[in-house]
Every structure is written in structure tokens, then in C-alpha cells.
């Protein structure tokens, strides 16, 4: 009971920010997750929160975030792999390899920003905020680095949300379905994909969302790769002497289990929808907590590098998709 009373003030603050973000997020085009982090960041920069709030913030940032990623599995539909077929899988594989090579190049150029580069790659390639938050755990990423990656990936995604429909419609050779593939394979957030896709038509919107769902399924293998490769090297550098499987976050098997339950177990659709929505709220609370524990001046030191790196990754992803879509989706 005493533990709960210790967490309650900070969690209450996160809930208040979350409610405001949910009410205003869609109207401001940036989405509730991004808005929650921005609101928290503004509040903490104006006046640093009391130390007694910190236990609740930490609980939201760590425990609730892990639970949010687990519950995200209930929103996945494994049948998208069958619907898209081999063309979709080939395009996702090409995109993954291209982003991996680009991230490796960024690390070679700026090894001190290794963690930031990996987070930007995950956010750009997979599913924005959730992928960044998931990869942060095995990377032992600092709070500032996570917040910065979330901010620039979502900001560039917002810009691309307006530009990609124009790009898709400007290519006379692209069909509506191919334009949907371009959008679904390029934008980081599901809301951005839906908004941009359906501006080009029903078929484009549906195809874009299918591609997006297929990209989210890459979260599990990529987290395993990070745990084995980058996670181990980070642990060695910090002198922990841990083996690779100790870097695998505990929420990863939970995410896999929830996805399997959503697709194989006889769970009512309404219940899965409630669980997925609850997970969305927990993710928003976690982003609010991250923002509330930071201040704007602490982010500006690496802002330029993050923006350049994220811009390069997004340009590579869009370019690869444009070059491949006509070949992969005839």
C-alpha cells in the first residue's frame, strides 16, 4: 500500500497529461503519443516537477511502457502476411537491409551516436514511437536519447504525411495500390499512414495500412538482432559482462504471446480492442513521463545530429520504396 501511495502522485500527473493529449492530439495532427511527450517536456522546462513525483514517472516510463508493448500485440493481424504475399515481404526485406546499411554508415561516421542511430532506424523502419521505446531497453538508451529520437521521427513523419500523397499522385506510372504501398512502407505512425493513404482513395488507404501492419511485425526479429549484436557490445563497453540473451527485454516474449493469442485463441474481438486501446493509453502515459523528466535545453545538444540522421533514413526509405514498388507490385 505504501508503495502505491509513493507512485500515485507521479502517475496522477501522467494521467492528466495523457487525458489532455488524447483530447487534443488528433486535432493538432501530431497524434496523442507525440503530444503527451511535448506537453511533458514543456511543463518540465517551465518548472521542474517535485522529486516526490519521480517514482510515479519512473514506473510509467519503465513498467507501464513494457506493458504497453506487450498489449500492442493484440492489435496485430498476422494474416496481413498472407494478404500482401511475397511482393510485400520482398519490399519489407529490401527496406530493412537498406535502413540497416544506412544505420551502420551513421554509426561509422558518428560512433558516439551509435544508440541514437539505432533508435532512429527502428523508429523510421518499424512503427515510430513504440519501436523506439522497445529498442531503448536492450540498448540501455538514455532518456534524452529516446525523447530526441521520438521527437524527430514523428516530426519528419508528420512532414512526409503531407508530401507523400503529392508524390504518389505525381507519378503517372503508379497505380492507386502502388501509391498505398509507398505510403504504408514509408511513414512511421499508423495514424499518419491512414491519413495519407485514404487521401488517395479507398484502395490506397487499405493497402497502406496492410503494409504498415506488416512492418510492425518486424519488431520482434529486429529486437532480437539488437539484443544479440548491439546490446551485447553495449554491455561489454559498460563492463557488465552479460551474455546476449540477458539483453532481450522481458516484454518481447509477452508481445509475441499476445500477438499469437490475438490470432489463434478464441478471444472476443471487443476484448482485444479494449486491450489494444488500454495499451495505447499506457504508451501515451509513458511518453508523458519521459517528457516530464526532461527539459528542452538538455535535448538541444544532439538535436542537429538527430535531425540529419533521421532525415537521411527517411529519404533512403522513400527512395528505395519508389524504386522498388513498380517492380515488386506490378
Image: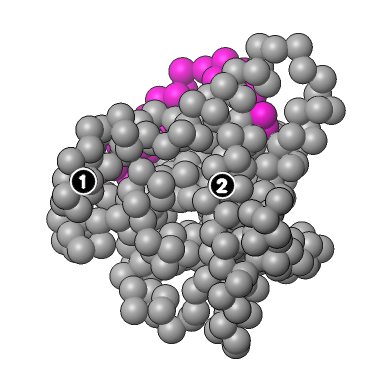
Q: Position of residue 29 (x, y in %)?
A: 70, 64
Residue 179 x, y percent position in the rendering: 57, 41
| Residue located beneath label 2 in the image | 63
Left or right: 240 with respect to 36?
left
Q: Is residue 329 visible?
A: no
Q: Is residue 313 highlighted in magenta?
A: no
Q: Is there any visible trace of residue 264 in the rendered image?
A: yes
Q: Is residue 130 above or below residue 326?
A: below
Q: Position of residue 136 (x, y in %)?
A: 41, 50
Along the viewing direction, whichever of 54 and 182 lies nearer the viewer: 54
| Above or below: residue 11 compared with residue 128 | below
- Residue at 30%, 29% (x, y): give it: 245
Residue 131 placement, left or right of 96: right
Q: Position of residue 218 (x, y in %)?
A: 45, 32
Q: Quadrant of residue 49?
A: bottom right
Q: Circle 1 — which element?
A: loop
- In this view, the residue in front, 306 or 11, is 11
Mark 2: which secondary structure? helix
Q: Whole-Å distance between the Cαs marked 1 and 2?
A: 22 Å
Q: In the rendered structure, which segment of residues is drawn in magenta?
A: 74-101
Residue occupying the point 37% across, 34% down = 248
Based on the picture, tell me whether residue 81 belongs to the magenta stretch: yes
Question: Which quadrant of the structure image shows residue 68?
Answer: top right
At 16% from the left and 45% from the top, the residue drawn is 236
* Mark nearer the N terminus (1 vs 2): 2
Q: Nearer the viewer, residue 190 or 143?
A: 143
Q: Which residue is mark 1?
A: 240
Residue 144 higher or lower than 245, as above or below: below
How would you rate the neighbour count of disc 1 (Cα within 10 Å): few for under 14, some for 14-19, many for 20 or more? few
Amino acid at each position: 500500500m505504501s508503495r502505491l501511495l509513493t507512485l500515485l502522485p507521479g502517475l496522477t500527473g501522467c494521467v492528466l497529461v495523457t487525458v489532455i493529449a488524447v483530447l487534443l492530439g488528433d486535432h493538432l495532427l501530431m497524434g496523442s503519443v507525440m503530444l503527451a511527450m511535448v506537453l511533458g517536456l514543456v511543463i518540465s522546462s517551465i518548472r521542474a516537477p517535485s522529486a516526490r513525483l519521480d517514482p510515479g514517472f519512473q514506473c510509467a516510463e519503465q513498467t507501464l511502457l513494457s506493458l504497453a508493448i506487450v498489449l500492442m500485440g493484440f492489435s496485430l493481424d498476422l494474416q496481413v502476411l498472407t494478404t500482401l504475399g511475397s511482393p510485400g515481404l520482398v519490399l519489407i526485406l529490401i527496406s530493412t537491409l537498406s535502413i540497416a546499411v544506412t544505420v551502420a554508415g551513421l554509426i561509422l561516421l558518428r560512433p558516439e551516436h551509435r544508440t541514437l542511430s539505432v533508435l532512429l532506424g527502428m523508429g523510421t523502419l518499424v512503427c515510430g514511437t513504440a519501436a523506439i521505446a522497445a529498442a531503448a531497453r536492450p540498448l540501455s538508451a538514455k532518456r534524452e536519447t529516446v525523447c530526441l529520437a521520438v521527437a524527430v521521427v514523428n516530426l519528419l513523419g508528420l512532414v512526409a504525411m503531407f508530401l507523400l500523397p503529392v508524390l504518389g499522385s505525381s507519378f503517372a506510372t503508379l497505380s492507386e495500390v502502388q501509391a498505398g504501398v509507398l505510403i504504408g512502407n514509408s511513414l512511421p505512425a499508423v495514424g499518419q499512414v491512414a491519413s495519407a493513404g485514404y487521401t488517395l482513395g479507398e484502395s490506397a488507404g487499405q493497402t497502406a495500412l496492410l503494409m504498415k501492419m506488416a512492418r510492425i511485425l518486424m519488431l520482434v526479429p529486429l529486437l532480437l538482432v539488437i539484443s544479440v549484436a548491439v546490446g551485447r557490445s553495449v554491455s561489454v563497453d559498460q563492463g557488465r559482462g552479460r551474455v546476449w540473451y540477458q539483453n532481450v527485454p522481458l516484454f518481447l516474449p509477452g508481445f509475441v504471446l499476445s500477438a499469437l493469442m490475438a490470432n489463434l485463441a478464441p478471444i472476443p474481438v471487443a476484448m482485444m480492442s479494449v486491450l489494444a486501446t488500454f495499451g495505447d493509453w499506457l504508451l501515451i502515459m509513458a511518453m508523458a513521463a519521459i517528457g516530464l523528466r526532461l527539459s528542452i535545453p538538455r535535448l538541444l545538444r544532439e538535436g542537429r545530429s538527430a535531425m540529419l540522421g533521421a532525415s537521411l533514413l527517411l529519404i533512403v526509405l522513400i527512395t528505395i520504396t519508389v524504386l522498388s514498388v513498380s517492380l515488386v507490385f506490378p
